[in-house]
Amino acid sequence: MFVLYIIILIIFLIFCGGLWDAPWLPTRKQNFKRIANLIKKNNQPVFYDLGSGNGDLLFYLSREHNIKCVGIEVSPILYLYSKFKSFFDKNVAIRYGDFFNYNLEGADIVYCFIKSEAYPKLKEKMKKELKKETIIILSCWPFKKVKPFKVSKLEKSNTFYSYRKKDIDFS
């Protein structure tokens, strides 16, 4: 019976992000290259992943494109796993907690795969903290009434919407 409780606890800790509008929806590895193609890679940008999960996207971008990455993860298990991996990659920093409690002003690119219900709060945070030239990449659900400057769409796969902060009407 004790083993069952431990299994239930581990499952809860992995998926607890759903309580914060950010359930664990991992970005598939076959989409990493598509995301990288949406990123300007000059001047070594700083890439933030809001709800970074196991960090695979961050480690890919660091390894394949030498991009400095910051992941913020609310699930203790996924945080600990990716934090351990980050000890072996100087370009990846992992932070624990709700990304709404972290300042994003250092980001050149922000990526998130979260439920669209969190977008109003996310847009308010971005309005206050992001630089004018920051690129925002959303997976699956676009911002309403905002035209992305790039879209990466494939059949039977996630669509990625890329925005510039300066093009978003925050009113």
Image (cartoon, grey):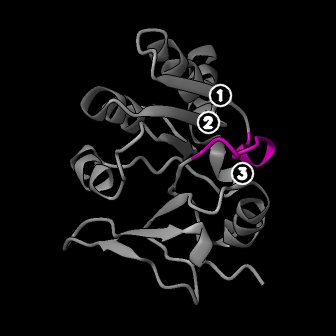
Going by the image, does 23 lie left or right of 44? right
Furthest residue toward front: 43
Q: From the viewer's side, name the closer residue of 171 and 44.
A: 44
Furthest residue toward bottom: 145
Which tag is nearer the camera, tag 3 or tag 1? 1
The residue carrying mark 2 is 73
Alpha carbons under labels 2 and 1: distance apart: 6 Å
Q: Which residue is drawn at 58% across and 26% down?
A: 94
Q: Which residue is drawn at 32% across and 54% down?
A: 35
Which of disc 3 and disc 2 is earlier in sequence? 3
The residue carrying mark 1 is 95
Mark 2 touches mark 3? (CB < 8 Å): no
Q: Which residue is drawn at 73% across and 73% down?
A: 120
x, y percentage for residue 18?
A: 64, 52
The residue carrying mark 3 is 19
Check disc 3 and report its element: helix, strand or loop.
Answer: helix
Type of the residue with mark 3: Leu
Type of the residue with mark 1: Arg
Which tag is nearer the camera, tag 2 or tag 3? 2
- Mark 2 surroundings within 10 Å by alpha-carbon count, few (fewer than 14), some (14 through 19), many (20 or more): many
Decide whether residue 104 is among the magenta residues: yes
x, y percentage for residue 132?
A: 64, 63
Type of the residue with mark 2: Glu
- Name the quadrant containing residue 101: top right
Mark 2 touches mark 1? (CB < 8 Å): yes
Q: In the rendered structure, which segment of residues is drawn in magenta?
A: 98-107
Task: Tell me: residue 76, above or below residue 47.
Answer: above
- Name the quadrant containing residue 60: top left
